[in-house]
Image (spheres, rainbow, N blue to C red):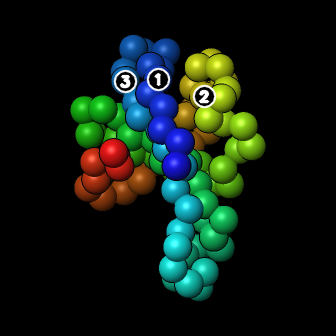
Amino acid sequence: MAHRTLSDGAGRAWEVWDTVPTGPRHMVHPEFADGWLTFQATDGAEKRRLAPIPVGWAGAPDAELAALLARARPVRGPSAPPPR
């Protein structure tokens, strides 16, 4: 699992990692069956997801990663800490 950090245009810090489900596919919404990028603000106040996982995201320039963040959809509910 790759893990990156970035700052958005407002200077907010984010962590991003790829998430790939390991359980049965029927337990995950079809949109997320092949995995997604998880973006979480380092202050824990916001979390977003983007599916499918873009090819080459882990080596993408920060500006491209910020564009992916802008496309990601907010996640409702409490945020969990990023994996370490």
User: Circle 1 sits in a helix, a strand or a loop, which is it?
Assistant: strand
4, above or below 35, in the image:
above
Asked if the residue under mark 2 is in contact with the one under mark 1, i.e. CB atoms within 8 Å, the reply is yes
Marking on residue 13: 3
User: Three-letter amino acid code at disc 1?
Assistant: Leu
Q: Give the mark count.
A: 3
Circle 2 SS class:
helix
- Amino acid carrying mark 3 in the image: Ala
Question: Which of the two discs, 1 and 2, labels the residue nearer the N terminus?
Answer: 1
Q: Percent from the top left, x then y, of residue 20?
A: 56, 62
Dot 2 amino acid type: Leu
Is the residue marked by circle 2 packed among few (<14), some (14-19), or many (20+) residues within 10 Å? Answer: many
What SS does tag 3 mark? strand
Q: Residue at x 51, y 79 (%)?
A: 23
The residue labelled by disc 2 is 65
Name which of mark 2 and mark 3 comes first in the sequence. 3
Looking at the picture, tell me which residue is in the foreground, 54 or 67.
54
* Nearest to N terminus: mark 3 or mark 1: 1
| Mark 1–mark 2 distance (CA, rounded to whole Å) | 8 Å
Residue at numbered disc 1: 6
Locate residue 40 relative to residue 25 in the image: left or right: left
What's the distance in space between the residues labelled 2 and 3, CA to CA?
12 Å
Task: Tell me residue 42's x, y (percent).
Answer: 30, 32
